[in-house]
Amino acid sequence: MESLANTLLLKTWFSPLLSAVFLINSGLPSNNSLNSKPIVTPKDPPAVVSAAPARAVPSPQLIQLRRAIIGQESGANFRAVNPHSGALGYAQIMPENLPHWSKQAIGRSVSSKEFLSNPELQLAIIDHRLNLYWQDALRGSKGNEEIAVRQVASRWYSGKPHLYTSTRIQYYNGHPYPSIASYTLSVLKKFKLLAANPMGKAGLLN
């Protein structure tokens, strides 16, 4: 009887162990794996898309200079196109300058059509170019603001800052335009009016 009892005890003790070994070797799932929670692999965090850098806020002098040139050029018409030269938009940028200027300002070249249809784009390109001219002119004039304004205006009008005192009548495709001196003095007058009254429009359109 004692031998039979020991045999039954061994069977009772070994049976679960043998069952587990059988399940492992057979590839069948055990009760523990069936009842356990599935392992969830955490997902990678969503990629952060960097926003395009905001356009730098232009200085008061640069805004005044831009508005003075605009008053001389398009009269604040973003869709203006010069019938003689093809100059474009708010500040009458020459079409041949647009690809290079836009790429420097915003990192890509834009078409004339896109340029004319987007005032914010025009301002970004205009302010970038004017700021380059303004800094050059301030250095060249040793800080003389009046000369710097006239040199920037001359460069915008003729491409040559040192001709700001030239009184020769300008021609484009046979059509007469004001002398560089006349143009730059008019821009300077508008610049001074805006400096005295930044929110005003006096003298901008004449």
Image (cartoon, grey):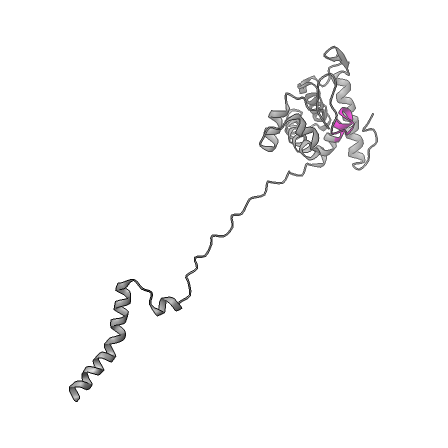
Judge by depth and name the residue closer to the eye, 168 or 92: 92
- Depth check, front residue: 196 or 109: 109
Looking at the image, the residue that sits furthest to the left is: 3
| Position in image of residue 160 (x %, y %) | 66, 18
Left or right, 129 with respect to 193, comes to: left
Residue at 80% x, 37% y is 199
Quick check: 199 left or right of 8? right
Residue range highlighted in magenta: 67-78
Vertical side of 30 occupied by 95: above or below: above
Q: Position of residue 26 (x, y in %)?
A: 27, 63
Q: Is residue 64 magenta?
A: no
Query: Left or right of 5: which side holds 55?
Result: right
**What is the quadrant of residue 65 in the picture?**
top right
167 or 139: which is nearer to us?
Answer: 167
- Residue placed at 66% from the left, 22% from the top? 95
Residue 72 lies, in percent from the top left, at 77, 24
- Report the front residue among 144 and 88: 88
Q: Residue at x 82, y 27 (%)?
A: 205
| Quadrant location of the C terminus in the rendered image | top right
Q: How many marks?
A: 0
Quadrant of the image occupied by residue 58: top right
Quadrant of residue 173 within the rendered picture: top right
Residue most extreme to the bottom: 1
Figure quadrant of the N terminus: bottom left
Residue furthest to the top in view is 174
Q: Position of residue 15 (x, y in %)?
A: 25, 75
